[in-house]
Every structure is written in structure tokens, then in C-alpha cells.
Image (spheres, grey):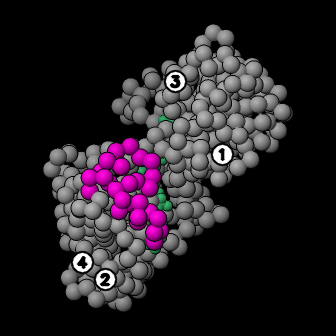
């Protein structure tokens, strides 16, 4: 099949490279010329394990990138993977996606065969019917051959390629049998080798499944953090408690890691967007509001633990980990951001380190110091907060001996406590 993928960010680049790897011909379309050039050079515009290898293999063969929408009508199906960021009130900003949807419609306005436009972006259920379908049809000038579907994406950053190629489930939201069959044809090569559940539904239910999935996972972590904070108050180890409850199949062992909370480009934005969409319907989603509140409090709790041991005014504090999770350079809504803000408010001198995410954080906080290694960051520091669970932090040992006062507050249960350091776990 020939697939056009509009938007070459985290999701668009991953799915374009993976579709090419599954044997499809792919045209990746983005308005950003630099991204297009990078892709055509066989390089990855983002740091994601395995992605560069796929791009190196397929760029110039089955994968081509361009800024033009000309390939859209020639393709069999078009995926829209455009960002859906938050407005100030937490609601979803559909501006960029709506523009791309309309441009896609324009590109297929004269197409005689049926064409499927699939929303890959995460969008609230009503917006498919109220904003996106109308935008595509407006662009297509009433061409009745155009159908809009929804295929939400469940990949995680840091394991995007393997998540995409081995999903637990695929959700096909289509409004006709033809649309469902077309989605089956796209994913057929994947399903030949991999046993995944396929959920066939309508586009709006598909988009609600995506929000329910993310809201459930974010709430699970917040609940674990709430329980973890209680464990800490009782002097108990939340990880021992969670390991036990994870043995219950109804709970499962995954996403039970308590600590400084969830960040990233999706959980914060998606939980806030579904809260805003619910309020729009006059429904008050109390559990989801508490989910956000618990998450917002964790960095403050971490700082309070540090303050128990260090007077923060003028103290040199090492922040270890800037990415929102390991294996990515993405700092969007990283817990390191509130951590740095809180330390600045307390008048601390901050030295930060991350294996890959220093550059984006430098843009966000140009006025703090950045170290070239964890060892350099710890050297002479009066305390450290560990915000991201990068594997390399688990091997830190003698490096703590170079600290002026070896106080370690671990927000991710990644540091091995040892003699000679004052160690505080956030929920253990
Ligand atoms: N990042 C993630 O791990 C996941 C994201 N999602 C959802 O997927 C969607 C996309 O997310 P990301 O890939 O993270 O966004 P992103 O911001 O990384 O990428 C969006 C891309 O679209 C391009 N773009 C904007 N307007 C365009 C237009 N009119 N025509 C062509 N290209 C255009 C931008 O230049 C950018 O490269 C969002 O709705 C997000 O919630 C879903 C699952 C996972
Ligand atoms: O919609 C999205 O964009 C994606 O959002 C999340 O993926 P992602 O944000 O990339 O990464 P996760 O592994 O889910 O981690 C999110 C945050 O939760 C934190 N986390 C995760 C697990 C855990 O047990 N505890 C915990 O604090 C991580 O440190 C990170 O800050 C979902 O897991 C994906 O299924 C979804 O597709």
C-alpha cells in the first residue's frame, strides 16, 4: 500500500518508519523543512531507540519525506499525526490539526476513488464530529469519496518502535465496513507476525478509548503515589507493598512505580483535556482532578525531604535527570521542570545533568549550570535530587563521596543506598 503520514514528530516519524518496515510505501509530510531534510538523509529528528536504524534502511527506498501534500491523493490512506497541545484552561488546541485536516481534504478534493483519512492524533470524542470531519470535508469541497476514521496510538516514548511493532491492541475507529477493512489492510503485515487484539468500533468511541487508557494509567500512578506517600509517613516501603498488590491479576504489576510522578507530552495534556471536555458537558470528573492534584504535589514533597537535611538558600543542588523518562530527550512536562522552579524559588544554586536532554532544558532554563556527567554534577554539591530513572544513575557509588554534604533524595528508586550518604526515598 501507499501510505501518507502527515506530521513527522514523535508519532509521525515512528509510524512512517514502521509502516515502511512493514513493507508499505510511505510519504512523510511535514511543514518543517529541516525535519524533511533530516528524514531524507536517513536520520532521525528525535532520539528514540531503533528509529535511526529503520530510517537509514528505508529512506530513499520505501520512505520519502516532503513538505508537499501532492502525494496524498495518490496514496491509499492518509494518517494525521499532528500535535494536539493544551490551551491555557487545559482544553485541547486543535488549531494545527484542523489546518492539516483541511489541507488533506483539499489534496483529495478531486479524487475519484474512495480515500480514508485517519486521525492518529489524540483528540476528544466530540471534536471528531464537530471539528475534524467538517474540516476534511470542507477542504474536499463536499467530495463524498472521503471518509474520516480514528486509529489512536498507544506507543510510549523511549520504546516507541517496539511498542508500535508489537502492540497489545489495535483500535480501528471507522464509520463504514470499507474503512475498517482498509485499516485491516494497513496493519495486515503486522498482524501476520504479531498476535494483537483488534477492536473495531466507531471513530468517537476510538478516541474515547485513547483518553480512558491514558487517564487510567495516569490515575493508577497517582493512586500509587498517594498510597506511597502514606507508606512513607508510616515508615514503610511502598515498593514492597506494590510488589504484593501487583500479584493480583486485577491490578497487574505494571505502572506501580511510585515517586516524583508522571510527566511527558501526553499524560498531563490528555488528563487535562478530558477533564476540560467533561466540564464542558457539565460533568465534574472528581477522580481525574485528584489524579492531577496528587501528581502536582510530588515535586514539592521531594523538596521537603531535601529541606529536612539541607538549608536550600544558597546551597548547591544537583538535579540528576531532565528528560520526562529514560531513553528519550523529551523534556515536555518533565518533573525536572517543577523541581528546578522550586529550587530556584528557594534560592539554591542548581547544577543539572542528563545523558541526552541537556540541550532542550538549556533552552527552558538558560540561567542554571549544566554538567557534562553525573559525577561532575555531584562534585561539591550540598544535596541531589534524582528525577529520571536513567540506568546509569543506578551505578553511581563513589561519586557521592565528592559531594560537600552527601544528601540524596531519590524520586525514582534508582539509587542504591550505601554507607556514607544520607538517603531519602520519596515513598519508601
Ligand atoms: N508523543 C507520543 O508519545 C504520543 C503522542 N500521541 C498523540 O499524537 C499526536 C502527535 O504527537 P507528537 O508526534 O508528539 O507531536 P509533535 O509535536 O512531536 O509532532 C507534530 C508534527 O506535525 C508537524 N505539523 C504541524 N502542522 C502541520 C501541517 N499542517 N502539515 C504537516 N505537518 C504539520 C509539526 O511540524 C511536527 O513535526 C498528539 O495528538 C499526541 O497526543 C499519541 C501517542 C503517543
Ligand atoms: O499518549 C501517549 O503519548 C502515551 O503516553 C504514555 O506514554 P509515555 O508518556 O511516552 O511514557 P510512560 O512510560 O507512560 O511514562 C509516562 C510518565 O509516567 C511515569 N511513570 C510511569 C510508570 C510508573 O509506574 N510510574 C511513573 O511515574 C514516567 O516516569 C513518565 O514520567 C502511555 O504509556 C502510552 O501508552 C501513550 O501512547
Q: Earlier in the sequence, mark 2 or mark 1?
A: 2
User: Is disc 4 placed on a helix, strand or loop?
Assistant: loop
How far apart marks 2 and 1 lie (CA) works out to: 43 Å
Ligand 1 near label 4 (Cβ, under 8 Å)? Answer: no
Magenta-tinted stretch: 31-58
Residue at 38 percent across and 28 percent down: it is 248
Could you say where residue 221 lies in the image, as x and y percent from the top left?
52, 38
What percent of the width, then of the height, locates residue 21?
24, 54
Which residue is located at x 47 percent, y 65 percent? 34
**Dot in front, 4 or 2:** 4
**Residue 416, above or below 38:** above
Q: Residue at x 22, y 57 (%)?
A: 187
Q: Earlier in the sequence, mark 1 or mark 4?
A: 4
Tell me which numbered mark, 1 or 3, is placed earlier along the sequence. Answer: 1
- The residue beneath circle 1 is 337
Q: What residue does disc 2 label?
A: 108
Does dot 1 land on a helix, a strand or a loop? helix
Amino acid at each position: 500500500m501507499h501510505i501518507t503520514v502527515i506530521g513527522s514528530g514523535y508519532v509521525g516519524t515512528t509510524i512512517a518508519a514502521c509502516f515502511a518496515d512493514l513493507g508499505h510505501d510511505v510519504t512523510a509530510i511535514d511543514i518543517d523543512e529541516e525535519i524533511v531534510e533530516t528524514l531524507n538523509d536517513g536520520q532521525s529528528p528525535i532520539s528514540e531507540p531503533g528509529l535511526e536504524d529503520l530510517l537509514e534502511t528505508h529512506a530513499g527506498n520505501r520512505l520519502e519525506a516532503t513538505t508537499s501534500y501532492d502525494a496524498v491523493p495518490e496514496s491509499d490512506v492518509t494518517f494525521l499525526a499532528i500535535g494536539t497541545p493544551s490551551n491555557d484552561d487545559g482544553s485541547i488546541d486543535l488549531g494545527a490539526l484542523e489546518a492539516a485536516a483541511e489541507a488533506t481534504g483539499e489534496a483529495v478534493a478531486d479524487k475519484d476513488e474512495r480515500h480514508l483519512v485517519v486521525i492518529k492524533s489524540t483528540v476528544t470524542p466530540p471534536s471528531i464530529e464537530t471539528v475534524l470531519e467538517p474540516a476534511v470535508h470542507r477542504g474536499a469541497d463536499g467530495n463524498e469519496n472521503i471518509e474520516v476514521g480514528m486509529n489512536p496510538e498507544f506507543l510510549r516514548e523511549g520504546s516507541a518502535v517496539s511498542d508500535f511493532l508489537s502492540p497489545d491492541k489495535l483500535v480501528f475507529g471507522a464509520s463504514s465496513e470499507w474503512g475498517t477493512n482498509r485499516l485491516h489492510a494497513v496493519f495486515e503485515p503486522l498482524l501476520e507476525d504479531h498476535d494483537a487484539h483488534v477492536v473495531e468500533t466507531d471513530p468517537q468511541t476510538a478516541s474515547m478509548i485513547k483518553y480512558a487508557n491514558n487517564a487510567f494509567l495516569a490515575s493508577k500512578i497517582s493512586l500509587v503515589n498517594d498510597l506511597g506517600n502514606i507508606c512513607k509517613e508510616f515508615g514503610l516501603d511502598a515498593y514492597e507493598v506494590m510488589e504484593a498488590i501487583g500479584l493480583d491479576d486485577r491490578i497487574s504489576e505494571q505502572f506501580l512505580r511510585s515517586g516524583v510522578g508522571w510527566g511527558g507530552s501526553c499524560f498531563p495534556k490528555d488528563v487535562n483535556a478530558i477533564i476540560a471536555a467533561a466540564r464542558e458537558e457539565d460533568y465534574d470528573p472528581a477522580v481525574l482532578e485528584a489524579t492531577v492534584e496528587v501528581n502536582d504535589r510530588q515535586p514539592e514533597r521531594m523538596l521537603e525531604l531535601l529541606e529536612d537535611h539541607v538549608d536550600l538558600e544558597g546551597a548547591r543542588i544537583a538535579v540528576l535527570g531532565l528528560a520526562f523518562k529514560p531513553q528519550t530527550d523529551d523534556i515536555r512536562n518533565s518533573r525536572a521542570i517543577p523541581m528546578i522552579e522550586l529550587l530556584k524559588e528557594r534560592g539554591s544554586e542548581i547544577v543539572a545533568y542528563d545523558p541526552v536532554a541537556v540541550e532542550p532544558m538549556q533552552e527552558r532554563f538558560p540561567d542554571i549550570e549544566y554538567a557534562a556527567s553525573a559525577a561532575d554534577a555531584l562534585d561539591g554539591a550540598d544535596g541531589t535530587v534524582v528525577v529520571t530513572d536513567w540506568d546509569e544513575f543506578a551505578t553511581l557509588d563513589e561519586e557521592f563521596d565528592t559531594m560537600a554534604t552527601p544528601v540524596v533524595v531519590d524520586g525514582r528508586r534508582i539509587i542504591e543506598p550505601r554507607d556514607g550518604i544520607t538517603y531519602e526515598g520519596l515513598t519508601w
